[in-house]
Image: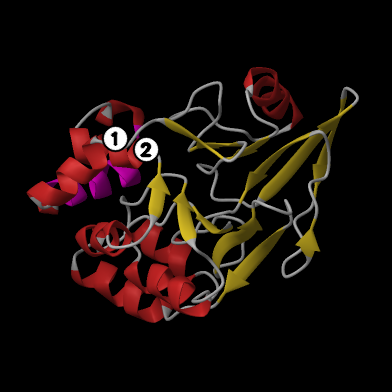
Amino acid sequence: MKILVLSDIHGNREALETVLSECEGEYQQIWCLGDIVGYGPDPNDCIEILAGKEVVAVMGNHDLGAGRGEKWDLFSPVARTMIEWTAERLSGQSRHYLSKLPEIAYRDGYTLVHGSPAGPVWRYILDGHSAAEAFSLMDTPACLYGHTHVPALFSLSKRALRYHQPRYGKRMRPPGQMWLANPGSCGIPRDGDGRAAFILLDTESGFFTFRRIVYPKNRTVEKLKRLGAPYQLIQLLQSDI
C-alpha cells in the first residue's frame, strides 16, 4: 500500500492542504503521527480534513493537551498559550476525535507513534541513545515517529546503530534490519527549513522517500498575527519567508 506519512501538522491548514494536493494520486492512506493541533490557527479545519480521508492516526502531546485538557503544566509557555487557545475553540466533534486517538498503532509491520516506543506521547528520539532505547522496545522491524519536528533516520543491523541524513526526493530502501524514521513536521518545522515535511512510503516494497514542499506560509502567519499568537511562534514561521 502507498502511504503518506505526516506528523506535527499543528493546526496549519495551508501546509496540510498543500501536501495533500501535491501528493494526490501518490498515496492510498495517510498515517498521521500525532499533533494534529497546537500552535496553528486552524485546528478544527485540520481535523475535519483528516477525518474525511482514509487515515490511521495516533495521539501527540498537543492532541492530549487540547483534546483532553491534560498535563498543561508540562508544556512551554508558548505551547501552553496556544494549547489553551486551541482547547477553547475546538468543536465537540474535534475534541471527541482527538480524545479517541490511540497512543500507538501497528500497521503492516510498522509501529506508529508520536514520541517513541519508550513513551508514545511524550518521549523524544533525539540521538543514538534514545534511538537505542526505542529499538530495544520495538515489536516490528520499523517505527515511524514524530515529536521533534526534525526529519531523521536511524538503523540497527548486527548491533550497529547508525544515523542516516535524510535525502529529499531520493527513493530509499530500508537501511537495516530495524529502522526508525521521522518525516519531520508538516506544519511547524524546526530544522531551519520552513517547507512542509513528509514521507511517501510503499509498504509492499519497503521503499520510502523524504519530501519537502513550499506552501503559502504568509497566510498562516497573518492568521496567527490576527489572533495575537506569541511573537516567538510567528518568528519561527517567518524565519525563512
The residue that disc 2 covers is 59
Asked if residue 86 lies in the magenta stretch, the reply is yes
Residue 32 in view (yes/no):
yes
Q: CA distance from mark 2 to mark 1?
A: 7 Å
Q: Residue at image x 21%, y 39%? A: 67
Determine crowd level at label 1: few under 14, some 14-19, many 20+ residues with C-alpha closer than 10 A: many
Q: Are marks 2 and 1 in contact (CB under 8 Å)?
A: yes
Amino acid identity at mark 1? Leu
Q: Residue at x 52, y 69 (%)?
A: 239
Relative image position of residue 223 (x, y in whole percent): 25, 72
Instruction: Please tell me whether mark 2 sits on a helix, a strand or a loop.
Output: loop
The amino acid beneath tag 2 is Met
Report the front residue among 1 and 60.
Answer: 1
Task: Kindly indicate the quadrant of the structure image that contains residue 197.
Answer: bottom right
Q: Is residue 157 above or below residue 9?
A: above
Q: Nearer the viewer, mark 2 or mark 1?
A: 2
Q: Is 227 positioned to the left or the right of 59 in the image?
A: left
Residue plotted at (29% across, 65% down): 49
Neighbour tally class for label 2: few under 14, some 14-19, many 20 plus, Cα within 10 Å: many
Q: Tell me if 57 is positioned left or right of 206 in this view.
A: left
- Compare residues 90 and 112 and report the one nearer the observer: 112
The residue positioned 29% from the left and 76% from the top of the image is 222
Residue 84 visible in the current orientation? no
Residue 64 marker:
1
For the record, the magenta segment spans: 75-88
- Foreground of the two, 103 or 106: 106
